[in-house]
Amino acid sequence: MPPFRLLFLACLFVLAATQAGFCGSSADDARERVRLSEDWAFHLGEAPGAEVPGFDDSKWRKLDVPHDWSIEQPYDPKMPGGSSVGYLPGGIGWYRKSFTLPESDKGKEIAIDFDGVYMDSQVWINGHLLGKRPNGYVGFRYDLTPYLKYGSEKNHIAVRANVEPSGSRWYPGAGIYRNVWLVKMNPIHVAHWGTAVTKPEVTKEKATVRLRTEVENKSAEASEVKLTSVILDQKGNEVAKAESKQRIAAGGMQEFDQQFVVANPLLWSPDSPDLYQVVSTVQAGGKTLDQYTTPLGIRTCEFTADRGFLLNGERVDIKGVCMHHDFGALGTAISDRALERQLEILREMGCNAIRTSHNPREPEFYAMCDRMGFMVMNEAFDVWEQKKLGNDYHKYFKEWHERDLTSMVRRDRNHPCVILWSVGNEVNEQHKQDFPGQRPQPCGHGGLQFSRGLREKWHHGRAGCLWPKLRPRNLRKIQRQKTPHRLGECNQLHDAG
């Protein structure tokens, strides 16, 4: 073979090895995140004992996740929920998967992350129940470390999901319909969703960035820990850096608070979705123990009474849609290309904002909205304690809402695309006279409501609907008044003519 061809092939091998991570540094080995997508066994229906490692699943269907079992079923015109759920059934489904871990993983903290399982899921590892999560739209993590086996012995994961009828007002799908990840970490590491990045001051000349990072020490000894955080631009160039040290007790956690100044920042907006990232490296004893990346978009947003919505100090019209999480005939199993295609179509029709009706979306959605320049109203719930359907989230709200809301906020708080947070869609509690503070609230039939005092002042009817009074000439009257009036959210579209 000619020498130049050998040299060319050698260069290709080096490039491929670099891309594949074969030539990684110690930082690459600090945290490993592996997608558990292949070779799951699935059974539709109840399967007593399927959580036991020795259970015989040889006759179960073999498939990859993400997977939506509901979209595969025959249509039933008598299905409870009818067209709202696509005339498709839910039911009970089981998933099982086995895997091995090398002896070298002993001493590491190993967790499993589910981006979403619909719904009422239970998860076991080697016969041990890790927990349950009724909400089918939030991500969750379980610590596998105490129950794992290493070497040639297999570990067995079992997941049960239960989709009851009359539980959703739209097509929800069923099963492990989002990605699953195995996460391997050193005992000293950044906590789950443990970073929060804010921008206290933003101008065209400079931006002040604040990063708060929770670092855990799950080892048996206290340790002096150094956190080095670097802000990189889209080309990978370093634009700011901060270092700090703290002593973390055994079994403890400390928050690092770091400040940066970015000169001449590129501001994130729908027309120019410029992004940065913060790469944080955890070190102790001269070794790199963890590396964690946080998305960063530098921007300001403000809602004003006189100029409307301001993004980076400039007025921007929010041209938004409400969008559920399914992909039409493809079902709900997450597909990067299906999601990207949806956003491309929305962009072509002039849309620049999306409301996540009526639940948190998958992580890929927010990352793609960051990159493509969509503003997001991130919504948590469709119901609170007062039900809309017999088996909807109202059964779980009292026990689970705080944990679910916390999970959503901690996971999504760093995405520049998120400009609004919604804690509920047309919740029935709003119609109660003792609704806390009688604050502005959706009227539930297309208008806006003020508090009771303002309703009396304006003498309007329609159960407090203000739309007849919010035409341009009446809005100008409100603006001329000295006392500001806060308007509630409207979930409907109105003709402003």
Image (cartoon, rainbow, N blue to C red):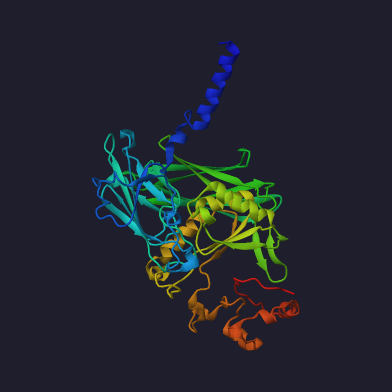
Q: Position of residue 204 (x, y in %)?
A: 71, 51
Q: Position of residue 8 (x, y in %)?
A: 58, 18
Q: Residue at x 70, y 63 (%)?
A: 317
Q: Position of residue 421 (x, y in %)?
A: 55, 64
Is residue 296 visible to the viewer in this orientation of the structure? no
Furthest-top residue in this view: 2
Nearer to the camera, 355 or 313: 355
Left or right relative to 209: residue 190: left
Nearer to the camera, 333 or 491: 333
Q: Residue at x 64, y 46 (%)?
A: 262
Q: Is residue 364 above or below residue 83?
A: above
Nearer to the camera, 140 or 344: 344
Q: Residue at x 65, y 50 (%)?
A: 273
Task: Tell me how many marks there are.
Answer: 0
The quadrant of the rendering that contains the C terminus is: bottom right
The quadrant of the rendering that contains the N terminus is: top right
Left or right relative to 142: residue 442: right
The picture quadrant where one finds residue 70 is bottom left
Is residue 191 visible to the viewer in this orientation of the structure? yes
Q: Is residue 417 above or below residue 305?
A: above
Left or right relative to 106: residue 313: right
Q: Position of residue 49 (x, y in %)?
A: 24, 53
